Image (cartoon, rainbow, N blue to C red):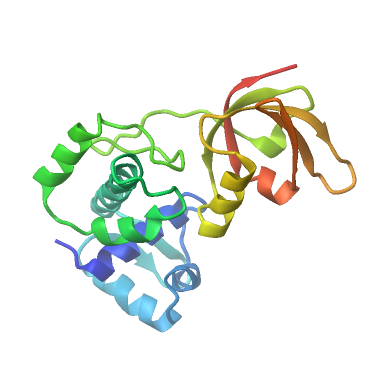
Amino acid sequence: MQSFTEENYLKVIYHLAEQTNNVQTNAIAEQIQTKPASVTDMIKKLAEKGLVDYIKYQGVTLTDKGRHAAVDIVRKHRLWEVFLVEKLNFKWDEVHDVAEELEHIKSVSLIERLDEFLGFPKADPHGDPIPDKNGRFAKTQFIKLIELKIGDSGTITGVSQHSSAFLKHLEKLGLTLGKQIKISDVTDFDGSVEILIEEKQINISREVAKHILISNNGKN
């Protein structure tokens, strides 16, 4: 069984590993907001428990045991986010910090009952997939909004940026999960995108567009 801190490290390594094969200690330190030396000490402890493989200067990788533990934490975090939004009426920009605390609850039976109570959801309020109790993720297909062409359409399925400020900005624009959009125009100068949503035209920056994920993409 892992401590609160060890679980946080495993989850951070898991998310960073989605972007690169060998996770560097400096990247972990930046995410956890601590000193690289402290990260190295913790990584050595995790390695002793068989949760990570660590070679100095080459980075960190999760072992099968470590990945299983990390996916379990991710599963709990995302289930709690669904619960907070669907049952307690939290907004999608409010749930992350609360779920960060709830994800460390150890009771397996509680999480199984929570999953059943929620109807075995496949995605959290941000569109991120929720693994099942065996650690399997449902297959999802999406494309970044920034990659769509003029005339293309689709459904907002998720976001790749979870900061409260970004989520509040999307909600203000009406760009929430499940909304249908169509690309009206793309500005050559700065890459900003004009979108048709619910019979209303709105403009978003390239930075915003690259963090919105679209499914059911319909070509013009």
Going 32% across and 59% down the picture, which residue do you hit? 98
Q: Is residue 41 above or below residue 185?
A: below
- Quarter-wise, where is residue 38 in the image? bottom left
Image location (x, y in percent) of residue 61: 38, 58
In depth, the one of 152 and 23 nearer the eye is 152
- Quarter-wise, where is residue 176 in the image? top right
In depth, the one of 207 and 89 nearer the eye is 89
Image location (x, y in percent) of residue 106: 14, 55
Question: Would residue 47 be visible to someone looking at this image?
Answer: no
Going 24% across and 57% down the picture, which residue do you hit? 102
What residue occupies the far right of the structure in this picture? 189
Question: Would residue 95 be visible to someone looking at this image?
Answer: yes
- Residue 182 located left or right of residue 26: right
Image location (x, y in percent) of residue 217: 62, 22
- Residue 170 located left or right of residue 182: left
The quadrant the C terminus occupies is top right
The quadrant the N terminus occupies is bottom left
